[in-house]
Image (cartoon, rainbow, N blue to C red):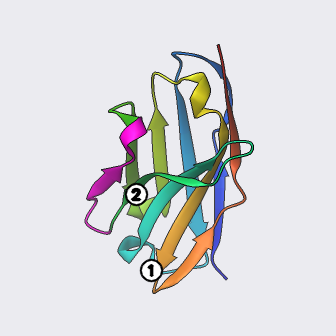
Amino acid sequence: QVQLVESGGGLVQAGGSLRLSCVASGTIFFSSSLMGWYRQAPGKQRERVAIIDSGSVTKYADFVNGRFTISRDNAKNTVYLQMNSLKPEDTGVYYCHALIRSVNYWGQGTQVTVSS
């Protein structure tokens, strides 16, 4: 059973930084997976933040605008999201997503709160 466990969320002032981590367990196919970070603000739909494929090619949502960096460490079955220059509108629950052999998996989410 694949499990994704996020960590690294918290409360930060506007302009600050956070680094989210997501560890995948229960799979030997992490290195070939498509990994991503999504977020959901209160009263809004979940939206994609960034994705990284098996070749470490990355894509970002327009609102990222160079502030976030997604990366992966296949030796540790871990994907990261480095978030800099955080804004109050970045507040929400951040979810890790994995597409492994055509099956979607989600983590439980980690709260990010950016105060103004």
Q: Which residue is drawn at 36% across and 76% down?
A: 32
Residue 94 at x, y percent in the picture: 62, 47
**Circle 1: residue type:** Phe
Residue 9 at x, y percent in the picture: 66, 37
Q: In this view, does 60 lie above or below 53?
A: above
Q: In this view, does 64 lie above or below 106?
A: above
Residue 86 at x, y percent in the picture: 52, 24
Q: Which stretch did the figure color magenta?
A: 54-63
**Circle 2: residue type:** Ile
Q: Is mark 1 on a helix, strand or loop?
A: loop
Q: Is mark 2 on a helix, strand or loop?
A: strand
What is the quadrant of the C terminus in the image? top right
Residue at label 2?
51
Q: Distance between the residues labelled 1 and 2?
A: 17 Å
Check residue 33 for magenta coloring: no
Relative depth, front residue between 65 and 11 = 65
CB of mark 1 within 8 Å of CB of mark 2?
no
Q: For label 2, count other residues whose C-alpha is less than 10 Å away and answer few (under 14), some (14-19) or many (20+).
A: many
Name the front one of labels 1 and 2. Answer: 2
Q: Residue at x 72, y 59 (%)?
A: 108
Residue 11 at x, y percent in the picture: 70, 25
Question: Would residue 110 be found to the left or right of residue 17 on screen?
Answer: right
> Which is more N-terminal, label 2 or label 1?
1
Q: In this view, does 65 lie above or below 33?
A: above
Q: Is residue 32 above or below residue 68?
A: below
Relative depth, front residue between 77 and 9 = 9
Q: For label 1, count other residues whose C-alpha is less than 10 Å away and answer few (under 14), some (14-19) or many (20+).
A: few
Q: Residue at x 47, y 44 (%)?
A: 81
Q: Which mark is residue 42?
A: none
Residue at label 1?
29
Q: Residue at x 57, y 16 (%)?
A: 14
What is the quadrant of the N terminus in the image? bottom right
